[in-house]
Amino acid sequence: MASGKPGAVHLAIAGLLHDVGKAFIPAEILEKPGRLEGEEQVVMRQHVNHGRNILTQQGGFSPEMIDVVAHHHEMLDGSGYPNGLMGNNIKDLVRVLTISDIFAALIEERAYKTAMDNETAYSILESMKGKLDPALLNAFKPIAKETKLAA
């Protein structure tokens, strides 16, 4: 991924678009106060396909943005979804977005969990060895330590 402003702009756009497919997920699943079970997980995982379809049908989005929307739940070890991509099949922009998406999910209050502090959240990311890019995770550390949620 190129450094400088184009990379930052691409990352910002990716951050705004990555979960657009959740618009097609029923509110009772998105806002469920407990763990998603069976069919609920299947439905939730479809948000990446919905998102890819939205951007593709709308037109005007780069393949890079469509890739982020479609693959931000992929893990380097192949354990992610929807395609079980591994290693170099996952682009850098997707890898960065995956790290920040997981971190945000950990530090934000959600219907199904309380917010956790940044230190604990980053420790969880570090424990995901083999799943997340270690160099990008290390580069993310100062951001993780300084991030404060808006009121």
Image (cartoon, rainbow, N blue to C red):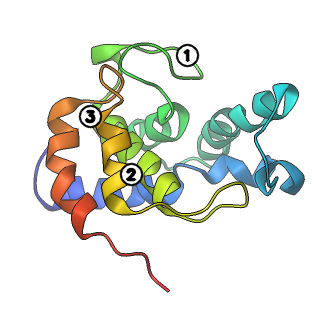
Q: Which residue is drawn at 26% across and 34% down?
A: 92
Upstream in the sequence, badge 2 or badge 1? 1
Residue 111 picture location, percent across and down: 73, 61
What residue does disc 1 label? 83
The three-letter amino acid code for the residue at tag 3 is: Asp
- In this view, which residue lies farthest toward the bottom? 151
In this rendered view, identify the residue nearer to me: 84 or 122.
122
What residue does disc 2 label? 121
Mark yes or no: residue 1 visible: no
Look at the numbered discs 2 and 1 and tell me whether their residues touch, using CB distance below 8 Å: no
Mark yes or no: residue 110 visible: yes
Q: How many angstroms separate mark 2 from mark 3 (CA)?
A: 21 Å
In this rendered view, identify the residue nearer to me: 33 or 90.
33
Which corner quadrant of the image does residue 55 belong to? top right
Residue 64 picture location, percent across and down: 38, 38
Upstream in the sequence, badge 1 or badge 3? 1
What residue does disc 3 label? 92
The three-letter amino acid code for the residue at tag 1 is: Asn
Residue 32 picture location, percent across and down: 82, 52
> Which quadrant of the rendered structure holds the N terminus?
top left
